[in-house]
Image (spheres, grey):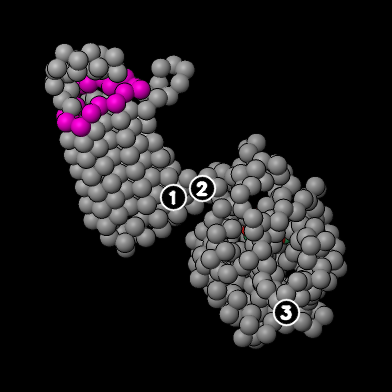
Amino acid sequence: MGKERVAIILAAGVSSRMNTKLPKVLHEVCGRPILAYVLDACRQAGVGSLYVVVGYGAEQVKKQFEGSKDITWVNQPEQKGTAHAVLCCKKHLKDFDGETLVLCGDGPLIRVATLKTLMEKHKTERSAATLATAVLDDPTGYGRIVRDTYGNIQGIVEHRECTKEQLAIKEVNPSYYLFNNKILFDSASKVKPDNVKKEYYLTDALSIMIAAGHKVTAVTAVLPEEAISINSRVQLSETGKIMQRRIQLELMNKGVTIVDPPNTWIDARAQIGQDTVIEPFTCIHGEVKIGRGCRVGPFAYLRSGTILKDDVVLGVFTEVKNSTLSNGVRARHHSYIGDAIVGENVNIGAGSITANFDGKKISRTRIGNNCYIGSDSTLIAPLELKDGSHIEPGAVISQESMDKSMRKGKKNVS
Ligand code: UD1
Ligand code: MG
């Protein structure tokens, strides 16, 4: 193995505080599993091989990420602590002569910039281990960073093991580490479960390194919000809020207007073009692509597979799912458009819907260019409307009734 950098991501824990059957790292934040964010941060920081340690619900986790070829799955059948989890990777990494990043799978707010700072510091200081720390107003629950009078790190003490003085320390360990791989495995194998939980703590490997004379550096580079790892449903929702803010900031910086950010929800996978305006109480769920100059909402609900081309207007209580709406489509009030392909400049009147489900199967609706769909129409799928079709208000249209009217030479269908 060469000198590249690898990552070990710890994701084997049960997470009793989440009170869940689903593996914790599969819970979603803004539409994506928690673990996906951690993996992406590693990739964007230039880490080529990812070793993910799984235990509880291992098969489920593997299945969700089965397309990712850069992941090596490592089983930890019994969760004996974070050092033990790292040691489970020994078989793969014992001869690796490079740097190993160790992160927890339950911290999706991790930023690429922080990982880069960690790598930079590790290099310039020529350390055996570098960890990124955060300073928190409320450090409850986290391992505390204990430094000597010169500011050198002496070790990390877990919350439960802290003395009264140590509990007052506000600098904490968010579990972002970079190690010289060989020193990591050597030190982790010396860790003893001498603590209240009888677990093998990775944090103890650092004290072992320091005692052996290796250089360990701590850099305060983690924003307080980034330090949050998800251990409960409350933290899940708080993390979701922070992530939502990040998603919206990025979109606004790219030229999207979000009229009322706190009352708008946008999935992490959504793409939105320049000069599109998102009105309040709009929910954009799943993989949705919105073009330029569109106006969406208020109270619009866009679901997975929706593509809006440019200059589309969707108004109040309009739901779109798995459909493509071409340039200039208008659906201003109370519509459901599901599994449809809608041509250019189509006007969909108030209350019109695609009836895409017959109780057994879902069918598609195709609406040609420049069609007029009168208010309160029901378009029963499967259905194809030719370019320029004119549907009278209140019509209930099936392919059969449509063809019949056409045969009679009618242009307007009702
Ligand atoms: C750990 C750190 C603590 C730090 C905190 C930050 C240790 C001993 N403590 O504590 O200093 O402030 O994270 O969030 O490392 N895991 C496994 N296998 C195991 C045990 C844990 O894969 O046997 C995984 C968990 O799934 C989780 C991560 O490791 O993703 C951290 O474990 P957790 O039990 O949450 O550690 P904390 O008590 O939060
Ligand atoms: Mg934790």
Give the label on residue 128, or none.
Answer: 3
Q: Secondary structure at mark 2?
A: strand
Q: Report the magenta residues as a range.
A: 371-388
Image coordinates for residue 48, horizontal then vertical, percent: 63, 66
Residue 170 figure quarter: bottom right
**The C terminus, quarter of image:** top left
Q: Nearer the viewer, residue 13 or 267?
A: 267
Q: Residue at x 42, y 39 (%)?
A: 304
Check mark 1 vs ligand 1: CB closer than 8 Å? yes or no.
no
Query: Which image quadrant shows ligand 1?
Result: bottom right
Image coordinates for residue 308, horizontal then vertical, percent: 30, 44
Q: Residue at x 23, y 56 (%)?
A: 275
Residue 310 seen in the current view: yes
Pointer 1 residue: 269
- Cα–Cα gap, marks 3 and 1: 37 Å
**The N terminus, quarter of image:** bottom right
Q: Is 188 positioned to the left or the right of 355 in the image? A: right
Give the label on residue 32, or none.
Answer: 2
- Cα–Cα gap, marks 2 and 3: 34 Å
Q: Is 3 positioned to the left or the right of 293 in the image? A: right
- Cα–Cα gap, marks 2 and 1: 8 Å
Q: Earlier in the sequence, mark 3 or mark 1?
A: 3
Report the amino acid beneath label 1: Arg
Q: Is 375 positioned to the left or the right of 214 in the image? A: left
Q: Do callouts 2 and 1 mark residues in contact (Cβ within 8 Å)? A: yes
Q: Residue at x 30, y 54 (%)?
A: 273
Residue 195 seen in the current view: no
Q: Residue at x 15, y 25 (%)?
A: 390
Residue 392 figure quarter: top left
Check mark 3 vs ligand 1: CB closer than 8 Å? yes or no.
no
Q: Is residue 381 magenta?
A: yes
Q: Is residue 214 above or below residue 84?
A: below
